[in-house]
Amino acid sequence: MPTFSGELRAPADARYAIVASRWNPRIVDVLVDGAVHALREHGVADDAIDLVRVPGAWEIPPTAAKLAAGGERAAILALGCVVRGDTRHYEHVADGCAQGLMRVALDYRIPVLNGVLAVERHADAEARAGGAHGNKGEEVALAALEMVDLWRRL
């Protein structure tokens, strides 16, 4: 039985886009740094990484769609942070962002990695941005490398 899986390798011709929100910069900037570091560590050149900053998580999916429509990127990494507040706004933004990112991946058939944290408290975000739970930006970048390799094999 054939088995397919991706490896952590960066094809020489692959470009990656990181779409990151400016909201919650103390968290998101650490996620971006982790993602860029992981891509560089696995052979992705700086000029093959596009960093696109948007106001908040809500703006990430349509920006990812615009990038995907261009056909120039091998994968899109979405990074942001939505923290629960006193209103239902959190659910709308977090759920809408996740659903939008999946739609971009399916519509454009490109790996779209969701590194938008949806957390209860800022402490939860800090734990996932270089704290006790690692750096989710780095994890998303590694998943992007693996998915690009896998999709090329398929």
Image (cartoon, helix red, strand yellow):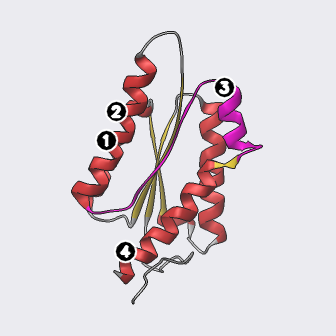
The quadrant in which residue 8 appears is bottom right
Tell me, for residue 122, which label it has, or none: 3
Q: Earlier in the sequence, mark 2 or mark 3?
A: 2
Q: Earlier in the sequence, mark 4 or mark 2?
A: 2
Q: Amino acid at mark 2?
A: Gly
> Circle 3 — which element?
helix
Q: 115 or 10, which lies in front?
A: 115
Q: Amino acid at mark 1?
A: Gly
Residue 70 position, x and y percent, is: 26, 59
Rendered position, 9 above or below 18: below
Left or right of residue 74: residue 132: right
Q: Amino acid at mark 3?
A: His
- Neighbor class of circle 4 (other Cα within 10 Å; few <14, some 14-19, many 20+) is some
Residues marked 1 and 4 touching at CB (< 8 Å): no
Q: Which residue is mark 1?
A: 100
Q: The magenta stretch spans which residues?
A: 109-133
Quadrant where the N terminus lies? bottom left
Q: Earlier in the sequence, mark 3 or mark 1?
A: 1
Q: Earlier in the sequence, mark 1 or mark 4?
A: 1
What's the CA distance linking mark 2 and mark 1? 6 Å
What's the CA distance linking mark 1 and mark 4? 21 Å
Q: Residue at x 64, y 23 (%)?
A: 121
Q: Which residue is mark 2?
A: 96
Q: Which residue is mark 4?
A: 151
